Amino acid sequence: RKEVEQDPGPFNVPEGATVAFNCTYSNSASQSFFWYRQDCRKEPKLLMSVYSSGNEDGRFTAQLNRASQYISLLIRDSKLSDSATYLCVVNGATSGTYKYIFGTGTRLKVLA
Amino acid sequence: DTGVSQNPRHKITKRGQNVTFRCDPISEHNRLYWYRQTLGQGPEFLTYFQNEAQLEKSRLLSDRFSAERPKGSFSTLEIQRTEQGDSAMYLCASSSRTSAQNTGELFFGEGSRLTVL
């Protein structure tokens, strides 16, 4: 089983739609969680961290469910510019380690 | 430009040859990471350094791969006796103690694309 699993998609949605991605992780001791965005042929960039209480940044909402070991990302009012691959990232499970494990990524295409 | 710099950006080599990639991190960053990414996959962790110390290396990494970070500044990733399966984008990222703890932000370079013929 992969350490971090995501549905690869693609998710094709019309502009203005709400879309949600889930990600599951295998190591219950994992300590921190993130969503990165990767545009085609570009390097990944941090989109947002995911906090236990859930957090929001504009149209983006991230949530963490430690009991079920999954992380979600909700994008409201999708824009064409949101088209990208969204990577779920989990930090290492032992204290003092900073090993970041990336999921396969979920491709999003927002259609006009 | 003060971002993460990787060289060469593209490398085409014949099977069996050795290749070396260089990464220059953001100057004040003490952690440096190497990842490999193939089409349709997320970045796969290879190894990471804190200053000059290599703290973790993926079990997936064969003995043909070696990475160094002398003096805790730039890093090199060498692949010996390349195989066609080594063809991928090799990404370098750096972070500082502060950024990693507070935001988990890794700053990636544009990558070095390897093609093994």
Image: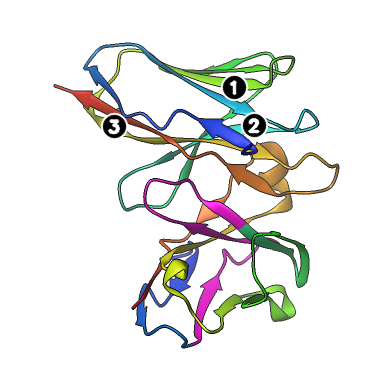
Determine the CA span between mark 1 and mark 2: 8 Å
Tell me the amino acid under the disc marked 3: Ser
* Residue A83: image tag: 3
Please report whichever mark, 1 or 3, sits nearer to the chain's N-terminal start: 1
B43 in relation to B16, above or below: above
Quadrant location of residue A24? Answer: top right
Q: Secondary structure at mark 1?
A: strand
Read off the residue under disc 2.
A33
Q: Secondary structure at mark 3?
A: loop
Read off the residue under disc 1.
A71
Query: Is B20 included in the stretch rendered in magenta?
Result: yes
Q: Chain of mark 2?
A: A
Tell me the amino acid under the disc marked 1: Ile
Q: Nearer the viewer, mark 1 or mark 2?
A: 1
Please report whichever mark, 2 or 3, sits nearer to the chain's N-terminal start: 2
User: Please, which residue is most extreme toward the left here?
Assistant: A112
**Circles 1 and 2: CB atoms closer than 8 Å:** yes
